[in-house]
Amino acid sequence: MGDKSSIEWTDATWNPVTGCTKISPGCKHCYAERLAHRLQAMGNPRYRNGFEITLHSDQIELPLRWRQPRRIFVNSMSDLFHEDVPDAFIERVFATMAEASWHAFQILTKRAERLAEMATQLAWPRNVWQGVSTESEEYVYRIMLLRQVPAAVRFVSVEPMLGRIRRLPLRGIHWVIVGGESGPNFRRIDPDWVREIRDQCLAANVPFFFKQWGGFRPKSGGRKLGGRTWDQSPQVPILGIRETREQTA
């Protein structure tokens, strides 16, 4: 439940829910599952259930105590739109995000169907960024569902990238993150796949963020593409935070 994060595209993580279940190939070597079992073995009470869905009601208002504005990744150890998370609990999380207007909240889900179904019953303050994971062409449909969501920022995480995506539907998308898999059983990423996504983003004027090549450890392969890092992000002023898009060299 950290107010600091080593994830390159965020500043902090907030986990009112922990645990998840696998639904697509990108879940096969889930880093959150490995970490949850490690924390369980260490006796961390938050992970007494291992990687089973666990609601932490006492954590819902945590961001209100963080006075310094930051980008907050919501549920880095779970999926907020998992079918076992009640609607009412999700609504409470959204209420906190609306109240903590000085932060930018980044939600990422693979369950785009439930996201689209719930979109009309949720309030969407401008500081909530909603994203979907799309690891290969087979899951591009998640982006089409994301387009139905009235979030101020809609973003796509292609991580771990497991296959070529010849045409990423970028209309209505404000940010794309790409990354290779890490861990002892990592699946290699093809540099041509990454370059193809970058070029699509440049052509569509969509900010592109390259997180990592991946490897046994997250930083094993570095994160340079074409001799430089790609840290572009959306231009969205949110009270205490102003995201500035890096200029393309």
Image (cartoon, rainbow, N blue to C red):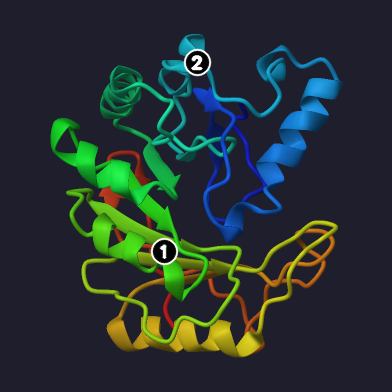
Q: Does residue 47 appear in this view?
A: yes
Q: Secondary structure at mark 1?
A: loop
Residue 221 location, x and y as percent?
78, 72
- Amino acid bearing label 1: Ser
Does residue 226 appear to the left or right of 176 in the view shown? right
* Foreground tag (1 vs 2): 2
At a point 50% along the width and 15% down the height, the residue shown is 59
Q: Residues within 10 Å of mark 2 (few under 14, many from 20)?
A: some
At a point 44% along the width and 75% down the height, the residue shown is 137
Q: CA distance from mark 1 to mark 2?
A: 28 Å
Q: With respect to residue 119, does 218 lie above or below?
A: below
Pick the residue in front: 80 or 233.
80
Does residue 227 appear to the left or right of 219 in the view shown? left
Q: With respect to residue 160, does 193 lie above or below?
A: below
Residue 7 location, x and y as percent?
62, 50
At a point 22% along the width and 73% down the height, the residue shown is 171
- Amino acid bearing label 2: Gln
Pick the residue in front: 74 or 5.
74
Residue position for label 1? 233
Q: Does residue 125 appear in this view?
A: no
Does residue 28 appear to the left or right of 11 in the view shown? right
Residue 183 location, x and y as percent?
80, 56
Mark sitting earlier along the chain (1/2): 2
Residue position for label 2? 59
In which image quadrant can residue 218 be found?
Answer: bottom right
In which image quadrant can residue 64 be found?
Answer: top left
Farthest top residue in view: 58
In which image quadrant can residue 212 be found?
Answer: bottom right
Quadrant of image for the N terminus? top right
At a point 77% along the width and 64% down the height, the residue shown is 186
Residue 112 location, x and y as percent?
34, 50
Q: Residues within 10 Å of mark 1 (few under 14, many from 20)?
A: many
